[in-house]
Amino acid sequence: MTTAIAATNARSAELFHALSDEARLEIIRILLDGEHCVCDLQDHLDVAQSRLSYHLKVLKDAGVVTDRREGRWSYYTLNREAIVEAERLLAALRPASGRRLIASCC
Amino acid sequence: MTTAIAATNARSAELFHALSDEARLEIIRILLDGEHCVCDLQDHLDVAQSRLSYHLKVLKDAGVVTDRREGRWSYYTLNREAIVEAERLLAALRPASGRRLIASCC
DNA sequence: TTGACATATCAAGATTTCTTGGTAGCTTCC
DNA sequence: GGAAGCTACCAAGAAATCTTGATATGTCAA
């Protein structure tokens, strides 16, 4: 069935789309050193609150970040598994090296 | 310099955007086994010619594929270096594994 | 030369994504 | 309780992307 590849492509497209916006990449870089609350992200980036919220939602819907509520604050964390998944999907798009046929190394 | 990160983000966004469309991912999968002419791609995929041409241009502009003309035909090849570049950019977005220090926030 | 063919490009409309300003739901503090 | 703070969500407009049909460009074959 071609359906399995179609599903893989759909998931790849979703993940890569989440990663294809500069504002979202800035958010991700801030989250690289661990969990941050929205207010913290707002301090680092200079963006409208609703815009930040929108991009966080895109990231969350794609599984790239997870969130946690604590009192008034929301904390976001980069989801390592999603990045690893993206790496795996991307590696599947890398053509075999021109000369080498040895598959001893990824 | 913040500029270096901004440039990296811009390039990342460009690459990931090229990879964030299902039609383009289908093209890439066909090119995985080597060079193909446009007519060949058209046989495999069921898309309008101008649509195919558009997506090939997006891929080419991002450096994901290269093209070569021979007589009436155009041949496209997946650019391994671009995929490797994307892998490298993606790896930089992967948080360190294991425990992390909670950043003081708010 | 003429005609058929392969592909790129263009313009217009359709669709999706993004931004902005406003508002509403919680929560905490007074 | 009321006010203030933090964040999500919504609606409308703006902007970007995608699709489609038409046309242009270059090539080969007769």
Image (tube, coloured by chain):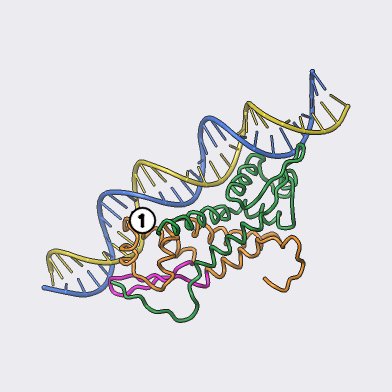
Chain colours: A orange, B green, C blue, D yellow
Q: In which quarter of the image is the N terminus of chain B?
A: bottom left
Q: Which residue is drawn at 52% across and 52% down?
A: B14
Q: Position of residue A46 (x, y in %)?
A: 32, 57
Q: Which residue is drawn at 68% across and 54% down?
A: B78
Answer above or below: position of D12 versus A94. Answer: above
Question: For residue A47: magenta?
Answer: no
Q: Position of residue A45 (x, y in %)?
A: 35, 60
What's drawn in magenta, residue-wise? A64-82
Q: B49 and B15: which one is in front?
A: B15
Say which amino acid is labelled 1.
Arg
- Residue bearing mark 1: A51
Q: B3 and D27: which one is in front?
A: B3
**What predominant SS class does the magenta segment belong to?**
strand
Which chain is mark 1 on? A
Q: Which residue is drawn at 76% across and 62% down?
A: A99
Q: Where is residue A90 in the image (x, y as percent from the top left)?
A: 61, 63
Q: Is residue D3 left or right of residue A30?
A: left
Give the secondary structure at mark 1: helix
User: Outermost residue toward the front?
Assistant: B1
Q: In this view, does D12 lie to the left or right of B52?
A: left
